[in-house]
Image (cartoon, rainbow, N blue to C red):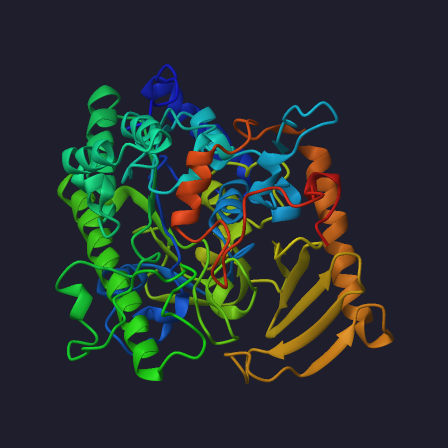
Amino acid sequence: MLPSLPRSRPIGAAALLCAFLLAACSSGDGGPERPPHVLLVSIDTLRADHLGCYGYERDTSPNLDALAARGARFERTFASTSWTLPSHLSMLTGLPVSGHGICDDRLWSRTDADGEPVPVTMHGTFLPEVLRAAGYRTGGFYTWKYLEPRFGFGPGFEVYERWGHTFYSHPEVAPEFERLRAAGDTDGLKALAAKHPALFDATRQSSPETIDRALAWIDEARAETPDAPLFTFVHLFDVHDPYTPPAPYDAKFDPDYDGPIDGKNVTSPDSPVRADMDPRDLAHLVALYDGGIAWVDSEVGRLLAGLETRGLLADTLVMVVSDHGEEFFEHGGKTHRAALYRESVHVPWIVAWPGHVPAGVTIGGSTGLVDLAPTVCGLVGLSGPDGATGRDLAPVLRGRAPLAEETVLSELYLFEGDGPPQRRAALLTGDEHVLLGAQGAAPWQGVRFDLARDAAEREALAAFRLDEPQAADVRARLDAQRAALAAARAATPPRLAGDSAPLSAAELAELAAMGYAGGGEAATSSAPRGPVPLCLDGCCW
């Protein structure tokens, strides 16, 4: 376990209630009579269309389906990008990628003329900062490197801990592993693995210990301040590849398969997971992914049951989301972080709060992960994070206002080889999804999809160049996004985004082990390759 952040002095119950009543009066929406607890669960790599409540034919998500039935479900929420780091920053700040400015992990490899690291800065105020300032106890429990404080996460959390460590990340074992590896001590490495087998097991599931710790923290916080509301953030990683759910979930959806695909080595250079793989093998790969969803769904059910047994669930605003989806060669690629098609960015957003959010509601229209933080604040009677461009959808959830049509922006930088990066952006407006791309300084190209008639985005309605007359409406939408982002950056001064030291060899190795450092169709490299974009200087597009 990594050290937790400093703890603030708990606020008195009477003062807390007074603060919330004042906030509710100023929020314009009435606000709750008393502040609820808030639970935010982010399930990494979870496609919305693989959940039963979103129409999937397999029984992957009975607990999430039941949660949606007890509350509301946003039908079409698109992520700000297709990978974990910038997407979670957008989720927690209410800003798109070009708003907070963290567009790529290569920002941690930049040096100045003297070879010194360039401080990594970002814009935005984090949701836990807003809630903690209002008197919430705040605890965050996460399971993957990209959510570490060195990448900017942690502000506002009094306790912020990583769980599910491997030998790459464990604070005691990782330095010893690196020392033995550098010395070429094979016997020492074998002994270390024998001493810590769980850390060397690539199929080990991290959800149980993460949820156990979150529930333990809830008990600790309630014992210390029984009247204080709690904000608990839980990040679960077991849907992500390798697709190796535990029994019986590994055989739940394809029990008769006897082929070579086992869910491992999905991104390795010699991976059997290729675009030309046998359709039967691909079907089993998807079944393993679905088994992982069912496994994590069972763990979410255990978390919610834990709140119920503690008498907290009825007074807890629960939100379940994902940071991005996953590709299975629908458009030629696998995993994620390479495209902005629907399978990469359409994520679930489920909201439940008994007595405050009507049950069984499906909200159509387009929303984005940037709307989450302002909406949490709106529901509990607070103003959203400073500068957030996302919308407070609390009135929509309460049935007091329709969902207005606005454009949802997704963005991506993609480095391949030694040339300039591919710049990608997508605009979701109503049923139209516009995908844009350019290589370096080349002119932007675009295609339009109508999701109402072509949800899988198989047939583009039209292809165009952004500078052509038929793209005037797209240019207008981009101009509106730029204006909003400029205002957001002006409202939130730059702040350091974690540790500016370059990523170490061990950190790069940890990322590479998960397919994030070269090799594989969807992988990218964390090593510097020429000029690195900095979205803080302007839009990534």
Image position, residue 60 (x, y; %): 25, 68
Is the residue 268 above or below the residue 104 in the image? below
Is the residue 45 above or below the residue 327 in the image? above
The answer to whether residue 312 is seen in the rendering is no
Q: Say left or right for 102 vs 256.
A: right
Q: Which residue is most to the top?
A: 9
The answer to whether residue 368 is seen in the rendering is yes
Viewport quadrant of the C terminus: bottom right
Image position, residue 364 (x, y; %): 49, 69
Q: Say left or right for 455 vs 181.
A: right
Q: Quadrant of residue 412?
A: bottom right
Image position, residue 162 (x, y; %): 33, 34
- Of residue 149 and residue 179, the one placed in the foreground of this image is 179
- Of residue 67 and residue 516, the one placed in the foreground of this image is 516
Q: Quadrant of residue 431?
A: bottom right
Viewport quadrant of the N terminus: top left
